[in-house]
C-alpha cells in the first residue's frame, strides 16, 4: 500500500477568468474536486505545496485533501486527475482532483516501464513499444506507479501481449482484445533495387 500524502486546500466562491487570474497572482491555483457521486466543489490550493505534492504523488498516489471551509475542515481522499499548465510559462492554470473511495476499485491509465535487454535486440532486432500506458483496475491505494515489463527473453518477431504481463497483486488489466504491448522487430533491410534498375536502364 502506498503512502497517502496530505494536501491543504480551501473552498472558493469566486469564479470566472478574472477571479482565477487574481488567485494565481496571489500564489494559488484554481482547482475543483469531483467524484463519481456527482459532487463538485470549487477549490483553491497554494501553488508551492501543490507542486511538491504533485512531484511525489503524480497521478497514481492517493492524496488526502484537507478542505478548509471557514472554520470547518473536511478530509477527502483523491487523485490528482489533471493539471492544466501554461503552454510556455511556469504557471499552473487549473487542477482537477478526483475523489475516491478507498474501499472501491478505480479504473485509470498507468505508464508502462520496459526493463531488461531483450535477446532479440542483442541479435540485431529493434524494440517496439506499442502501448506506453495500460488501463488497469485496482483499489486506489494499490495503484502502481508503473507497469514494469521485463523483455529479457523476448526474441526477434516475438511480442508480449497484455495477457502475458505479470501485474502487481490486486491490479487487473482492462481489455477486450488481447493486444501486443511490446515486441522485437527485424531491422529494415537496405534496398538496392533502385540502383540496379538505374544500371539496367543505362545498359539498355
Image: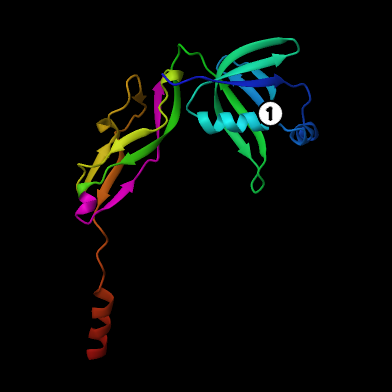
| Tally of numbered tags | 1
Q: Position of residue 183 (x, y in %)?
A: 27, 45
Asked which quadrant contains residue 182, the reply is top left
Judged from the image, the secondary structure of the residue bearing numbered disc 1 is: strand
Asked which quadrant contains residue 201, the reply is bottom left
When the figure is inspected, residue 113 is found, relative to residue 99, above or below; the finding is below
Q: Is residue 21 left or right of residue 106?
A: right
Q: Is residue 58 visible?
A: no
Q: Report the front residue among 57 and 86.
A: 57
Q: Is residue 138 left or right of residue 76?
A: left
* Extreme residue toward the top, this view: 72
Question: Which residues fall within the magenta stretch?
Answer: 120-138
User: What colour scheme has been applied to the protein in the rendered image?
Assistant: rainbow
Quadrant containing the N terminus is top left
Examine the structure image and report whether residue 117 is included in the region drawn in magenta. Answer: no
Q: Residue at x 69, y 22 (%)?
A: 42
Q: Residue at x 65, y 20 (%)?
A: 8
Q: Residues within 10 Å of mark 1 (few under 14, many from 20)?
A: some
Q: Position of residue 126 (x, y in %)?
A: 28, 53
When the figure is inspected, residue 44 is found, relative to residue 72, above or below; the finding is below
Q: Is residue 12 left or right of residue 79?
A: right
Residue annotated with mark 1: 46
Q: Residue at x 67, y 19 (%)?
A: 41
Amino acid at each position: 500500500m502506498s503512502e497517502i500524502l496530505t494536501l491543504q486546500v480551501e473552498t472558493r466562491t469566486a469564479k470566472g477568468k478574472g477571479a482565477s487570474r487574481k488567485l494565481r497572482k496571489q500564489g494559488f491555483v484554481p482547482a475543483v474536486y469531483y467524484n463519481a457521486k456527482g459532487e463538485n466543489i470549487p477549490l483553491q490550493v497554494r501553488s508551492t505545496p501543490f507542486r511538491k505534492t504533485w512531484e511525489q504523488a503524480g497521478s497514481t498516489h492517493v492524496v488526502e485533501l484537507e478542505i478548509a471551509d471557514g472554520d470547518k475542515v473536511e478530509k477527502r481522499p483523491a487523485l490528482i486527475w489533471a493539471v492544466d499548465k501554461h503552454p510556455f510559462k511556469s504557471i499552473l492554470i487549473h487542477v482537477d482532483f478526483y475523489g475516491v473511495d478507498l474501499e472501491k476499485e478505480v479504473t485509470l491509465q498507468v505508464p508502462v516501464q520496459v526493463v531488461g535487454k531483450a535477446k532479440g535486440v542483442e541479435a540485431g532486432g529493434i524494440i517496439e513499444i506499442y502501448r506506453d500506458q495500460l488501463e488497469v483496475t485496482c483499489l486506489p491505494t494499490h495503484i502502481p506507479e508503473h507497469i514494469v515489463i521485463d523483455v529479457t527473453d523476448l526474441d526477434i518477431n516475438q511480442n508480449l501481449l497484455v495477457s502475458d504481463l505479470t501485474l502487481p497483486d490486486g491490479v487487473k488489466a482492462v481489455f477486450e482484445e488481447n493486444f501486443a504491448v511490446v515486441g522485437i522487430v527485424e531491422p529494415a533491410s537496405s534496398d538496392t533495387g533502385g540502383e540496379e534498375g538505374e544500371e539496367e536502364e543505362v545498359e539498355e
